[in-house]
Image (cartoon, rainbow, N blue to C red):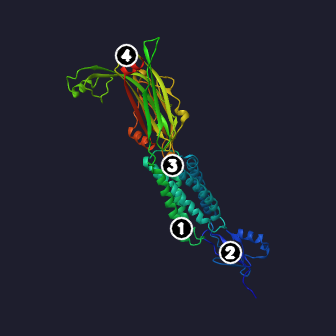
Amino acid sequence: MNIRPWVVVEPPDSRGLRRVTIDGQLAGSAWSRAELARVLRRRGCAEYVDLDDPASVHWRGGDSGDWPDRPWRRRSTMSLMVAGLLVSMVFNVVIGWPDASGALTFAQRITGVLFVLSGVLLGISAISALDHWGRQQFKASGAIVLLGAFTVLATDGLLLLLWFEEKEYTRHLLVCLPAFCWSIWALWILVRHTSWKGVPQPRKFAAGVVVTALLTAVSLAYSTMYQPAAAPMHFTLKAEFGKAREDSRLPFVHVPLTLHVKNTGGVPVYILNDIYTVRGRGALYSLGEEDLMAEWRESVGKQGTREGEAELYVDRLAYTTISSGRFSESGNSLDVGQEYALTRVFQLPRAVEYDTVSVELQISYMRKDRGKIDVQEFRSAHPSWNERDRSYYCDPAMCGSQLIYRARVRHNNNLINVTRKPRYVTAVWSPRGRFISSISSFPFSFSVLGDYAEERRELERYGAAGARADAEIAVAELLRSAG
């Protein structure tokens, strides 16, 4: 005769949950005596079973009063685990999606995709946490939660590493820093309870989790900190004078000027600022009785004189701006192989006293694979003499007349954006030759000097630089071509 009790209650596990079998078949599990009674009622045998009768119920690892579960502590731990995983899931997806969907380079897209995938993993981990601190119907749920905690540690650790480079406050730090601390707490809880026990070969799984997290962190750090230099920038700039034409009604000649810019490099760019300037040169000619250095010393310091020029037979070089203008528009794109050409006409009096006329074309640009500019905002000019625009106003007696272009610039790697203060690109233009382009975090002001070390660093980070071309022609040649 079989005298084995037909109801068996197993010893409590690490969380206090006790498995229940009836006639050798798993009937469920219970956290308490009352829950055990509910399990038996579902099986239709509660009224026939006396829980304190050893002939009806066999208690293993304790008796009917041994229920070590602490519901408040268990549910609090579960709630904190789920909340941390869900917050990190949203955070990682928000960070990664802009790069995954819109980055220009493959490495940046991979960074974004990794963050989005990590968010998906964290969502699965949050669901697994409900099971792991519940009835553990899925044996690997604890291991999945452990993997999620390692993922939060790796991604938020990377963000904090990037933040420590410049230690600038951003609102994302309010999520990143608590999430990093949460991941350390979560790993301590999960390791202490050996949450990987339900997985075959748990040691190999744990080692795989650590290696995967480290490789992911290294990959993300490399793709974030490394700025590829394999695609250099090249431009072809040309400035040419055409054949002058005489005006039959006025004592002037009309001189055509053709400007040309082509992106011959491997990366598209934004045009931040540009200017062309036509200058006439006046000079006092001599027979060169003095040596070259004496002529140069006498010319240096004269108004309008270029200090980098020295000529033996001319003295007192002076330059006068004849024409100045914009070649393109701030914020315009110049894609690979794309070119712009512009033809302008300027006037010279037939009795002009200049001996030569020169033109200088300058552009400043920013690589599009490094950042994205709010083009609509950047194309709005702010006149410095407009008193109603207090942010950009400056007394014309002190600053002259200038146009200021300013807009937000975002790095193409969104990990940089969330660990730095906002950056702004600024361009200043004036027909007198005022030509400035900068990128920085400080607000624009004529009266407050910025951090020029930061400007140089940001210009390099965003791949901003400049190019120029010039040409010169004798006035005698222009007048001869005009007939």
* Closer mark to the observer between disc 2 and disc 4: 4
Q: Is the C-beta separation of discs 2 and 1 under 8 Å?
A: no
Q: Is the C-beta separation of discs 2 and 4 under 8 Å?
A: no
Q: Label 3, label 2: how many angstroms apart (C-alpha)?
A: 56 Å
Q: Position of residue 105 (x, y in %)?
A: 52, 48
Q: Is the C-beta separation of discs 4 and 1 under 8 Å?
A: no
* Closer mark to the observer between disc 4 and disc 1: 4
Q: Which residue is mark 4?
A: 352
Q: Label 2, label 4: how many angstroms apart (C-alpha)?
A: 114 Å
Disc number for residue 206: 1
Q: Which residue is mark 2?
A: 64
Check disc 4 and give the amino acid type.
Val
> Callout 4: 10 Å neighbours few (<14), some, many (20+)?
few
Q: Label 2, label 1: how many angstroms apart (C-alpha)?
A: 37 Å
Q: Is the C-beta separation of discs 3 and 1 under 8 Å?
A: no
What is the secondary structure assignment of the residue under circle 2?
Answer: loop
Farthest residue to the bottom: give it: 1
Q: In the rendered image, which quarter contains the N terminus?
A: bottom right
> Callout 2: 10 Å neighbours few (<14), some, many (20+)?
some
Between discs 4 and 1, the one toward the N terminus: 1
Q: Which residue is mark 3?
A: 415
Q: Label 4, label 1: how many angstroms apart (C-alpha)?
A: 85 Å
**Residue shown at the point (27%, 24%) measured from the top left:** 299
Q: Is the C-beta separation of discs 3 and 2 under 8 Å?
A: no
Where residue 19 sits, quadrant-wise, is bottom right
Q: Nearer the viewer, residue 56 or 262?
A: 262
Q: Nearer the viewer, residue 290 or 11?
A: 290
